[in-house]
Amino acid sequence: MADRVFNRETLLDLTVNFIPMGMIIFFFALFILADPFPADAMAVGTSLGLLVIPFVVLAVTTYVTGRIIAEADQTGSSGTAAKISSVATGIDGEADDAE
């Protein structure tokens, strides 16, 4: 059987992000069902965009964080975290080895 990416402890660490994601889903459904701006497409697009964009960013952040936690639990270090920090700082660890 294949190992799961996120074990129970990792999912427990990530529940902090699941609650805001649930709140965003609730307000998204509320805006769709209640239709507070029936005649103004710009207002509807803006309000839905202000819900969808943070949801996507939070979902990606939650996945990457979970992957880093799972890698660190399994191996003691995380290659994903090293790649992210090298991109963020602009320092490539492989470039130092080539010189």
Image: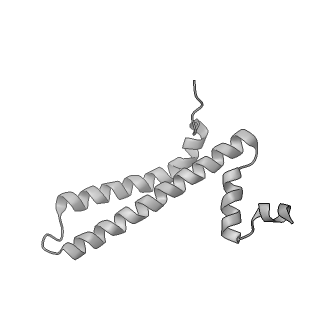
Residue at left offset 59%, top offset 42% = 10
- Is residue 20 rendered to the left or right of residue 71? left
Residue 76, percent from left and from top? 76, 44
- In this view, which residue lies farthest toward the left? 39
Residue 62, percent from left and from top? 53, 53
Which of 81 and 96 lies nearest the eye of the viewer? 96
- Is residue 37 rendered to the left or right of residue 84? left
Tell me: residue 78, above or below residue 84. above
Residue at left offset 29%, top offset 59% = 28
Q: How many numbered tags mark residues here?
A: 0
Tell me: residue 85, above or below residue 62. below
- In this view, which residue lies farthest toward the right? 99
Residue 91, percent from left and from top? 75, 69
Residue at left offset 30%, top offset 59% = 27
Residue 65, percent from left and from top? 59, 53
Q: Where does the C terminus fall, quadrant-wise?
A: bottom right
Which of 97 and 45 lies nearest the eye of the viewer? 97
Quadrant of the rendered image containing residue 85: bottom right
- Is residue 76 rendered to the left or right of residue 84? right
Residue at left offset 84%, top offset 62% = 98
- In this view, which residue lies farthest toward the top? 1
Quadrant of the rendered image containing residue 32: bottom left
Q: Where does the N terminus fall, quadrant-wise?
A: top right
Quadrant of the rendered image containing residue 87: bottom right
